Image (cartoon, rainbow, N blue to C red):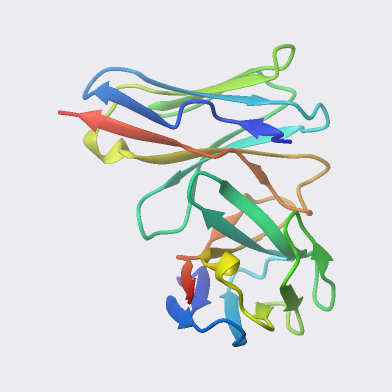
């Protein structure tokens, strides 16, 4: 029973490099989310999706892009990484009648 | 402007006693509130929730109280156990929650033996 799976778990990037974080859920949830957690800041919403083929901006979307080509997958892209994007990234999924389930997180360091 | 506030970054409680974690909110549109628990190097896990039409919800050792007029909720854990040591996040949403949760900054609960 995997739930929400994030790939990779750790990554170090150089400033200006690009990468994609993958989130996969096996609960047939309609809604998917990307959050970032920084020390003393709680979790902040980057982008979200309410269904396959749809995406929307959250609280801190700048510097990130997302895609939801399949219902079970939600991709977060960094086109040109910056040190300010050093953070722990969490993906979550939910449906209209369930709470949000979170992945185990991706620790990203941009040097 | 923080819409969900947890003003205590940390709380230390003796094992067996009651732990009370507090949360305040400013957005009157919030109609559902949740508590998540997070261990280091893991994702947050759902603990308990409450709808704005209720003032109390209980699940085993965990009880959440909601005071809408004060825009305040609290999580009570009794008795506190060593495994309860974690960071607790208060979260809220409005209108079904499809557009995501708004989180507080978290409270680190430490249960002392």
In this view, A79 is above or below B70? below
Q: Residue at x 76, y 48 (%)?
A: B97
> Residue B13, percent across and down?
28, 22
> Residue B52, percent across and down?
73, 26
Q: Quadrant of residue A100?
A: bottom right
Q: Quadrant of residue A101?
A: bottom right
Q: Is residue B76 left or right of residue B113?
A: right
Quadrant location of the C terminus of chain B in the rendered image: top left
The answer to whether any part of residue A8 appears in the image is: no
Q: Is residue B15 left or right of residue B92?
A: left
Q: Quadrant of residue B112?
A: top left
Task: Count the labels in the image.
Answer: 0
> Residue A68, percent across and down?
75, 79
Q: Depth check: give the residue in front, B72 or A83.
A: A83
Q: Residue at x 80, y 70 (%)?
A: A51
In this view, A12 is above or below B58? below
> Residue B110, percent across and down?
29, 33
The answer to whether any part of residue A98 appears in the image is: yes
Quadrant location of the N terminus of chain B in the rendered image: top right
In this view, B81 is above or below B18? below
Q: Depth check: give the residue in front, B31 or A27.
A: B31
Specify the farthest residue to the top. B69
Q: Residue at x 83, y 42 (%)?
A: B95
Specify the farthest residue to the left. B113
């Amino acid at each position: 029973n995997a739930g929400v799976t994030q790939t990779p778990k750790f990554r170090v990037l150089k400033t200006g490099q690009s990468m994609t974080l993958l989130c996969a859920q096996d609960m047939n949830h309609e809604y998917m989310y990307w959050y970032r957690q920084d020390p003393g800041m709680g979790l902040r919403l980057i982008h979200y999706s309410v269904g396959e083929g749809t995406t929307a901006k959250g609280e801190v979307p700048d510097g990130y892009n997302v895609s939801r080509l399949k219902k079970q997958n939600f991709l977060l892209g960094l086109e040109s990484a910056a040190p300010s994007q050093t953070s722990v990234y969490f993906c979550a999924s939910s449906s209209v009648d369930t709470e949000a389930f979170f992945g185990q997180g991706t620790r990203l360091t941009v040097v | 402007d923080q819409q969900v506030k947890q003003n205590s970054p940390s709380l230390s409680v003796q094992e067996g006693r009651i732990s009370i974690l507090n949360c305040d909110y400013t957005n009157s549109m919030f109609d559902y509130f949740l508590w998540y628990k997070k261990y280091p190097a893991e994702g947050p896990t759902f603990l308990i929730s409450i709808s704005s039409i209720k003032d109390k919800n209980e699940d085993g050792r965990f009880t959440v109280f909601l005071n809408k007029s004060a825009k305040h909720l609290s999580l009570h854990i009794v008795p506190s156990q060593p495994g309860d040591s974690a960071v607790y996040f208060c979260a809220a949403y409005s209108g079904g929650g499809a557009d995501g949760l708004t989180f507080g900054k978290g409270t680190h609960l430490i249960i002392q033996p």
